[in-house]
Amino acid sequence: MSTTNPHTKPWRNWSGAVRFTPRNFAKPHSIPQLQSLVREVGARNGQLRVVGSGHSFTPLVQTPDTLVSLENLSGIESVDGHIGHIYAGTSLKPLGIELARRGFGMTNLGDINKQALAGAVSTGTHGTGASLGSISTQIRGMDLVLASGEAIHCSATENAEIFDAARVCVGALGVIAKLDIELQPAYRLKLIKRAMDLDDCLAQAPDLARLYRHFEFYWIPHTRRTLVKLMDWTAEPESARGMTTAAELLIENGAFGVASRLARMNPDWAPGIARFIGNVTKSDESTMVADCHRAFSTTRLVRFQEMEYELPVERGPDALRELAEHIQRKQVRVHFPVEYRYVAADDIWLSPFYQRDAVAISVHQYVGMAHQEYFAAAEAIFRNHGGRPHWGKMHNLAERELSELYPRWNDFQRVRKQLDPKGMFSNALLRRWFGD
Ligand SMILES: Cc1cc2nc3c(=O)[nH]c(=O)nc-3n(C[C@H](O)[C@H](O)[C@H](O)COP(=O)(O)OP(=O)(O)OC[C@H]3O[C@@H](n4cnc5c(N)ncnc54)[C@H](O)[C@@H]3O)c2cc1C
């Protein structure tokens, strides 16, 4: 029985910027079925890309041939001690709920919970916390289906080189079928949100990053306002959820959609809209307690395009000041906040956090508004400060520039060529990054 289905409907990513129609769209129900599919595509020298939940901003999963979703390969297989064996297609939200039911939580998460676990891992998705690595650092083992159709297990002690290459590999080495994740006993977090002046915030940032398990802030362009989020363990009971601050009402709510549509109708209004948001949020302060699987994620009602670079931690403040100065001087038509987070160093070959503690600075633009000039200027600043781009977000680098940013680039390429000699798991974007 064929495991592929002819597919005629166009596929689109979350932001809507990537649209294409694959020849086949497959949703295997088991690992043996996934292996047969890979063998079938390999036998005809075809191409195959895996999609998680389509939340990457670039044509990472685009393919003219076979697109595979593992949505039917999802759920918790088992939990042994503090290691969860999780199917790769599991979506983070139901995963968090089910782990909490069993008394566990993930160490850290990004600011949404819509991704598939393997999708999040494959691009080095991260949250914030100076002592906490990306989600990929929570992985202790992985089942990978190779181009030959063979399924292998890798970990720090078994196929260790493949493990170092595969924990962030944008689907270039094979199909991740299952992941072993180190879990925490379920915990609760107290979230404090407050508005701060940009200079005060940058001056206090090193202390806040050290004192709180999680610290991040949003800077509102065209203003000196930041909206700070601090989170730490607590034994206090969960509080009722609700919107309490102007920022929550404006930015995490439909009102931001209205403001964004106004900005798109007349981009010259964008700086004024940003200043309005800065003004109404100036005395924001709120506190909330939530179980860990609920504490991290926010709802993103307004669609945007995004670029993010991970900079050496000590370069972050100057990079942000230069970006603020550029936006002011050029009166850049943007009202979306700039996000600033902390991520700890790791040892994963293609992780943007490889061997260095970093701040992640993200710039956003509302869908349908021009982002190219703004992102190009931000990219020049980030690169000048030694930044490495987020693998799931927009950037303009190709193989030569990328290879200079990663000390283990050649090792990754060696493993990639060994596991996928015919480039079955490649596509146009990956050829730009890794060559043939
Ligand atoms: C609203 C929004 C908020 C976001 N917030 C954050 C954040 O807080 N922090 C952050 O770091 N990023 C964030 N991102 C980026 C996002 O987490 C990454 O782009 C992530 O990779 C998307 O996961 P996905 O499941 O949608 O994967 P996709 O975008 O579908 O795929 C991503 C990559 O993973 C590969 N892949 C997926 N499944 C498999 C598999 N089983 N085997 C092999 N390869 C596979 C794909 O081929 C592709 O290369 C955000 C994105 C959006 C749209």
Image (cartoon, helix red, strand yellow):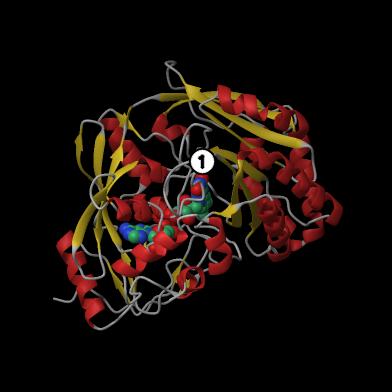
Image quadrant in which you'd find residue 5: bottom left
Front residue (pair 295, 280): 295
Q: Position of residue 165 (x, y in %)?
A: 37, 55
Q: Position of residue 191 (x, y in %)?
A: 53, 26
The residue carrying pointer 1 sits among few (fewer than 14), some (14 to 19) or many (20 or more) residues within 10 Å by Cα, namely few
> Looking at the picture, does residue 426 appear above or below residue 139?
below
Q: Quadrant of ligand 1?
A: bottom left
Q: Secondary structure at mark 1?
A: loop
Residue 356 in view: yes
The answer to whether the beta carbon of the residue marked 1 is less than 8 Å from any atom of ligand 1 is no
Front residue (pair 98, 310): 310
> Residue flagged by tag 1: what amino acid is it?
Thr
Q: Residue at x 37, y 62 (%)?
A: 171
Q: With 3 as the anchor, is 320 left or right in this view?
A: right
Q: Position of residue 146 (x, y in %)?
A: 25, 65
Q: Quadrant of the C terminus?
A: bottom left
Image quadrant in which you'd find residue 82: top left
Q: Position of residue 299 (x, y in %)?
A: 51, 44
Q: Residue at x 38, y 25 (%)?
A: 187
How many numbered markers are drawn?
1
Task: Give the residue pinned by disc 1.
Answer: 298
